[in-house]
Each structure stands twice: as C-alpha cells, then as structure tokens.
Image: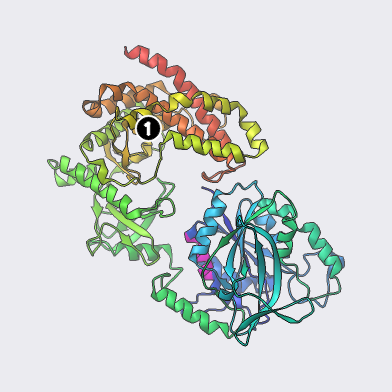
Amino acid sequence: MNKPTLVILAAGMGSRYGGLKQIDALNAEGDTIIDFSLYDALRAGFGKFVFIIRRSFEREFKEIFNKKLEGKADVAYIYQELENVPEKYINPNRIKPWGTGHALLMAEEAITGNFAIINADDFYGAEAFETMAKHLIKTDKNSFNFSTMAYLLKNTVSDHGYVSRGECQVNEKGYLTSVNERTHIEKIDGKLRRKDAFGNFVSIDENTIVSMNFWGFTPKCFEFGSALFMTFLEENKENHKAEFYIPSVVNDMLKSDKVHVEVLKSDAKWFGVTYKEDKEIVQKAIADLKHKNRYPTNLWCTLEEELKSVFNQFEHKNEFESYVELASGHINDTYLIKTDEKPYYVLQRINDGVFKDVPGLINNKISISDHIKDKLSHLPKETLNRRVLSFVKTKTGDKFYKADTNSYWNMTIFIDDSVTFETINNEKVAYEGGKLFGEFLQLTNDFNVSNLIEVIPRFHDMSFRYSQFEDALETASEKRLNKSKPYLTMVENYRAEMHILQSLKESGAIKSRVTHNDTKISNALFDLNNEGLCVIDTDTVMSGIVHYDFGDAIRTICNTATEDETNLDLVAFNKTYYKAYKRGFLEKVESSLSPLEIIYLPLGAKTIIFIMALRFLTDYLNGDVYYKTKYPDHNFDRAKNQFKLLQSFSEKIVQLERESV
C-alpha cells in the first residue's frame, strides 16, 4: 500500500497572532498545533511530511520537528521565499509570502504520489485525516480525482477576530463546482458576516460549507496553476500585499472537464491559533482531548520508551533492557524485547488500519495456540513452548493491551535458538516446511471454525477478485490498459478453472477448516539443524480450505526467482521443492484429508499463483493504490512474473502427476 504524503503550509508570518504560531508551544510537553496534525496523519497512514517554511526560521523549526519524526516518516523541506518568482516581479516592499497557491506549486519537487495539504495553524481532528488518507490511498495517482475536507462555517470561526475561509459550491453528487476565498469573515453582534469586494460587510449563512485548506491531490494537479500564477504576478506586481490562494488554483482546475473534486464533509469543530487570544481556548481543548485519552500525554516519546511502557503492561518478571525490530512482516510492527534474563519476548503492534477487528484477530490466534497446546500436552513444558506460540496476558488478565493511542499490542514468548528463511536453498527445508504447515492443519482439523472471525473478508474469494478486476478495467488509464492487453485474454480464459475450488467449497464438497492463510516459508520456524519447530505469524488464521495454505506455500517456495524479478527467463517452477514440500505436507495431514481434497491440491497451487497475478494486475490498472511500488510499472512486472510462474507450473505439474502414477 503506497502511503500518501502530507504537505504542511508553515511559511506564514503570523501577523495577526503576533509571532511564529507554527512553533509556539501550547503546553508543558511542548506540543505545537502542528504536532497533533502530524500525530493524527501518521496514525491515519501518511508516510511522508513536506514542510513549506522560510529559511528565516529553518533552524528553530527543524530543531522541534526532526527529532520528533525521526524513524517515523520521511521528511522534506521546501522554502517559500519572496524571491521564488521571476526577478522582474520581486517587490522590495513585500513582507508576506506569495500565498498558499504559490506554496502548492512549489511542493511539486517533493511529491511523487498522492498527497494532502493543510494549514500549520489549524486543528483538523483524527477522523479528518483518516477519511482523507483512505480517499488518497484508493485514488489512482494518474487521475484527476481530487478532494477537499469541508466543514460548516459556524464550526470554524474565531471569537477574537476575522478568519479566511474558502466558500464551497457543491453539486447534488457531492462534487465541488467552485470555491471562493473569503478573506474576511467574523462574528459581529453574534452573527456571521463577510466583507465583499468593496469592503462592505454582508451576511453569510452559518451553515455554509467551507474549505479549511485541507485538500487532497494527485500529482496531476501540477498541470494547473502555473500559468494562472504568472497572470497573478503580472496583475499584482505593484501590490505587495496580494496573495495567490489555493482556491484560485482549484477554480482553474475545475474549468477542465476531466477534473473532479469530491467534497469530504466533517462535522468536527475547528480550533486554531489565528489570534493570540485563541491560544487559551486551544490549550483547554487539547488538555480535554488528552484527558479523554484521545491523545497520549507525551505524543513523541522515543520508540524505546514506548516499547518499555507497553512491555510492562504484560505479566512477566523480567527487566526491559533493549529491543530489535523484526522485519519478518509487512503489515504489523514486531519487536524482539531483550530482558535481564531469559526468556526474551516478542511484542507486536497490530495494524488496525488493515485489520478492522483486532480483538477478534487476537482471539483467533490465542484460541488456535491453546487448541494446539491441548493436543500436544504430553510434551514437556519447555518443548511445548518451542513448538507452539505462547501468548502472555496483561497484568489485568486481558489477551491484549490497548494503549491510550488506541493501538493494540500482544506479546509472545520468544523461541530461542531458532531460524527463519526468506527463500529456500535446499530440499530439506522444503520438506520440513511442508511437515510444519501440514501438522498445523492436522492439529486444528477438529477446531470449530464458527468460533473464528473472518480476519480479511473475501480474501480468497475468486468472484470478488474478478469483480475488482472488472471495476479496474472500467477506470484504468488508456496507457495501462493497452500495456495489459496481452494478459486480459489470459485472465478471461482462466475464469472457469479458477472458480472450481470456490464452487467446491460453497457446495460443501470440500470442507471449511482452520487455515493459516500466509504460509510463506518465513512463517515457519526451524531449529539450528533446519528441522521444523513452530508455525508463526498467525494473524490471518481463519476459516478456509486446505488448498489455500498448500497453494500459497507452493507459490512462494517453488518460484526460482523472487516475485519482483523482471527477467522472466529466470522465473520457473521448481519441481524438486514441490515434491519435497508435498511429501512433508501429506506425511502430516493426509489422514484428515478426503480423496477429493488431495486430488485438487495441485489446483490449489495454480489458483493461488493466479489470484496473486490477478491482484497485481488489478492494482496496476487501478494506479497502484494497494501494494507498495518502487517504480511506475512495478505491479505490472509482478503480474508478468506470476503469469510466467503460472505457465511454468501448468507445464511441469502435468509431468509431476504422470511421475506419481
């Protein structure tokens, strides 16, 4: 999943505030109003911050924010100076920057994907960032589909003077038709009024929908505004107070039929530091939010401090000494906690952006571990704790700890003297891996799957994946659609075969059982002699069919190249590892499989290889909104890789089945 960028407009001089409000501390912890936007944005899924500032306060700004964001997100700085215009337009009398529209245009050099832009001196609220992040993540970065977070005017005014707001005109479908910058709106005798073009006050409805300069854009936005800015400069070369605003750029965009700006509405009450008198109100509002545990007391404690605090919420007798980040997963944050004495522990923060029911997920994991432990209760305790994940309860007896930041943590005992493999380089590891995952299915064969939640809905639902693909075809760019054409026919030709397992499952011919659903070899733990120890990373345990687990393992173990390999001559299906894995797998689980399940195991491998090829191709057509990519055709190359593996598997599996007869 490609994380969006957040651009923060912080180059303003704070003339009405009387100083640099962007970095003015609001409490004893030293929080600025920007801190809360950064914190909310990180939790919502933003991965990079671009600050638009001025060099005159660069040192103070970086001293405050670089340390806070270190290791948490990428950071870039853009300097909006008065000289960032053609020389003939430089006005020696100008003091203020050229405006938010100019800042937007300057941000282009730091932008590679979808991004949002906000004011530095406004509090927008966590829900606004969550809504915007979701919108940006699902939006094709090559599209002209933009957005704005809109508020009711009555929720966005100051009691201490006038404010500027963008008055929005919205059509019946919820899209912006125009936005007008109102540079002077204030309360007069309890009613809201604005100044018109002649400086006269006129009434304005308190329920007017307004923009708070919280916009969502794709990189395509930079095709607009530049010519308009040059016109602005020419018309205002003698006006040293004129500013070029983002609404001017947006209105320029809206002249194009291909641009759509969706209005994302918020009912939240704004607070910000436009005036010095606003500060006390903001301080009280923030203190109240912290009291309600909407924010932790210390927003920016170090990772080590955070881990130590969370670790000590669990039941143990050890002293925290250090930590090591474990990079075995791509979704959750997982850490090895080293203590003054063994055992060590594994502490994991579950990504609640991906997994919607984290308590249910953790209950799945622990229920399955407890079930397997009951089955292996004849083993000595020390051996048992090396064969099955052992979860540690909190000091209050709960299965997980929910921090005051609403993040979820669980903890297991670390299995010492063990190794994992990212790839396989010998037949024994394939065989032992097959035994491990086969035994996992055998030991959970009698578990009642109705007691498990569906962690990822419709994860292997082929009809659903085809539906996503068909939707992507409707919205794909012409360029990407043309490039994909050789594979579109292939996808259609496989349609009937790829629905066979789903049909058998839905008819009850193949039973639903506990499945792991992420059986890559790195989720198998081995001892120092390369013999199988334990199945790990059980976050995706839920109901499925045996073919999902068999197929996923074969897809990852038996590819002679990585899934990112672009030289398709190197991509082939490894028959030796297939035979070794299948032998170990059936050695453990065959007794609980029906003849029909065994017959369709090869189709399980073929189906999972295909479904990954289809998902990569779908994401490519959607503009790379789900998987992380490093270059424009990355997902397309992954899809081609998997289609080549599918072709190689289809050819060699025929030979293998003949050999087994």
Which range of residues does the magenta coloring cover? Answer: 35-43
Q: Is residue 525 left or right of residue 496?
A: left
Q: Is residue 456 left or right of residue 647?
A: left
Residue at 53% over, 36% down: 469
Is the residue marked by circle 1 packed among few (<14), some (14-19), or many (20+) residues within 10 Å? many
Write down the quadrant of residue 24 in the picture.
Answer: bottom right
Q: Nearer the viewer, residue 8 or 123?
A: 123
Task: Specify whether residue 488 is painted magenta.
Answer: no
Residue that carries the numbered disc 1 in the rendered image: 553
Location of residue 385 in the rendering, given as x and y in whole percent from the top left corner: 21, 46
In the image, is residue 498 above or below residue 14? above
Q: Is residue 108 left or right of residue 333?
A: right
Q: Is residue 22 left or right of residue 615?
A: right
Identify the element where label 1 is drawn.
Answer: helix
Residue at 47% over, 29% down: 610
In the image, is residue 299 above or below residue 261? below
